[in-house]
């Protein structure tokens, strides 16, 4: 089995090095043949590894390598300025390892803006791809719908939307095992003439693309599982993504509040506890690990800013799966 190397920006997330290093250590133990480059302050990383008892002679310790970086890009900095000025930041150093071919992919929970700037600065696009797309797997009635773009391209051209459909369809075939993914264009109605001129033209391009294009869809069809791939511009996609995250958390909180309100409902909740646990898991972003950027020659996974160790481990696992599936 070919060894895969993944760079991990240790300092990107809200929870700091503790969560990221723990997630990387869990990934090193779970994914065989995977080497992880932990990019960040050496002393900090070494301290976290010692806390986890992850140093040699542990049999998995050799799969972790530290790459020292003395600076950190924060979310309150201007991305273009920060990426240019902080050449020794954990994010920039991690991206350099991918550019130089030292790593096959990269995981970061850092500033989305800085990630975008770094992608356009250091990572090449696949031949013919106009713009990379940020994607998210959203839970639906039967599984997941891939939503793209989720924030990388607030303004699009019709050909961008066509390519989003092509990238998303290929992802769902190779990585999710769906033979002929159904592709829908998010719009304000099902009729072909609905939407802006950009969306109207994109509709026609998608019809002629050879994809399993089912036409325009409305937002409510995503959770219903009508399509496997839902495409839109990054402005709309980011709103859908954030609304889905907020709605799922709110519904879970309301359900818990109602179930705990009375003795009888508490008994019912106890009996239904396994079902509620499964439901919570289906809506938990940590199970996916992060949002991949498609259309690049190397995989970049943007983990949620508040990612814990479990989310980081799964984000690394997503990179591993991409490499092994030959995407």
Image: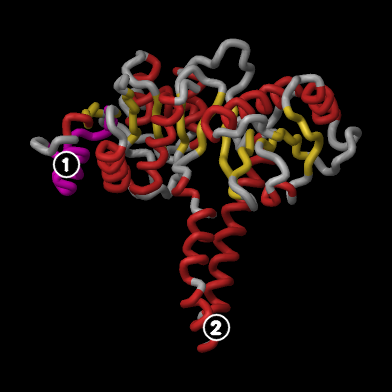
How far apart, in angstroms, are the residues tagged by discs 1 and 2? Answer: 45 Å
Residue at 50% from the left image edge and 25% from the top image edge? 117
Residue at 54% from the left image edge and 27% from the top image edge? 174
For the residue carrying disc 1, how many other residues have a C-alpha within 10 Å: few (<14), some (14-19), or many (20+)?
Answer: many
Q: Circle 1 — which element?
A: loop
Residue at 28% from the left image edge and 32% from the top image edge? 32
> Which residue is situated farthest in the left direction here?
57
Mark 1 and mark 2 lie on one chain; the one further toward the N terminus is 1
Residue at 51% from the left image edge and 72% from the top image edge? 272
Looking at the image, is 164 positioned above or below residue 284?
A: above
Label disc, if present, on residue 265 of the rendered structure: 2
Asked whether, in this view, residue 6 is left or right of residue 287, the answer is: left
Residue range highlighted in magenta: 35-55
For the residue carrying disc 2, how many other residues have a C-alpha within 10 Å: few (<14), some (14-19), or many (20+)?
Answer: few
Pick the residue in front: 148 or 238.
148
Residue 222 picture location, percent across and down: 69, 46
> Which residue is situated farthest in the bottom direction here?
263
- Based on the picture, tell me whether residue 37 belongs to the magenta stretch: yes
* Quadrant holding the N terminus: top left
Looking at the image, is 110 positioned above or below residue 308?
A: above
Pick the residue in front: 44 or 108.
108
Q: Which residue is mark 1?
A: 54
Asked whether, in this view, residue 88 is left or right of residue 246, the answer is: left
Q: Circle 2 — which element?
A: helix
- Based on the picture, tell me whether residue 262 belongs to the magenta stretch: no
Looking at the image, is 30 positioned above or below residue 104?
A: below
Task: Report which quarter residue 303 is drawn in.
Answer: top left
């Amino acid at each position: 089995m070919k060894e895969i190397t993944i760079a991990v920006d240790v300092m990107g997330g809200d929870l700091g090095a503790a969560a990221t290093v723990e997630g990387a250590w869990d990934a090193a133990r779970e994914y065989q043949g995977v080497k992880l480059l932990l990019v960040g302050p050496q002393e900090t990383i070494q301290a976290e590894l010692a806390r986890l008892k992850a140093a040699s002679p542990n049999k998995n310790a050799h799969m972790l390598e530290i790459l020292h970086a003395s600076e950190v890009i924060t979310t309150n900095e201007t991305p273009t300025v920060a990426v240019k000025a902080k050449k020794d930041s954990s994010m920039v150093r991690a991206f350099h390892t991918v550019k130089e071919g030292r790593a096959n992919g990269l995981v970061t929970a850092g500033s989305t803006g800085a990630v975008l700037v770094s992608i356009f600065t250091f990572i090449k696009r696949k031949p013919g791809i106009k713009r990379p797309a940020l994607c998210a797997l959203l839970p639906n009635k039967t599984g997941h719908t891939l939503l793209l773009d989720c924030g990388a391209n607030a303004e699009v051209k019709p050909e961008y939307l066509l390519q989003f459909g092509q990238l998303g369809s290929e992802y769902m075939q190779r990585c999710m095992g769906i033979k002929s993914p159904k592709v829908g264009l998010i719009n304000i109605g099902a009729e072909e003439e609905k939407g802006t001129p950009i969306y109207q033209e994109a509709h026609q391009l998608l019809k002629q693309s050879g994809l399993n294009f089912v036409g325009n869809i409305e937002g409510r069809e995503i959770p219903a599982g009508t399509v496997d791939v839902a495409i839109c511009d990054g402005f709309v996609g980011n709103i859908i993504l954030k609304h889905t995250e907020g709605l799922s958390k709110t519904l879970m909180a309301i359900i818990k509040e109602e179930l705990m309100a009375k003795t009888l409902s508490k008994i019912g909740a106890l009996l239904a506890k396994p079902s509620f646990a499964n439901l919570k898991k289906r809506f938990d972003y940590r199970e996916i690990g992060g949002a991949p950027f498609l259309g690049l020659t190397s995989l970049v996974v943007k983990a949620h800013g508040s990612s814990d160790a479990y989310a980081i481990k799964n984000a690394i696992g997503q990179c591993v799966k991409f490499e092994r599936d030959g995407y």
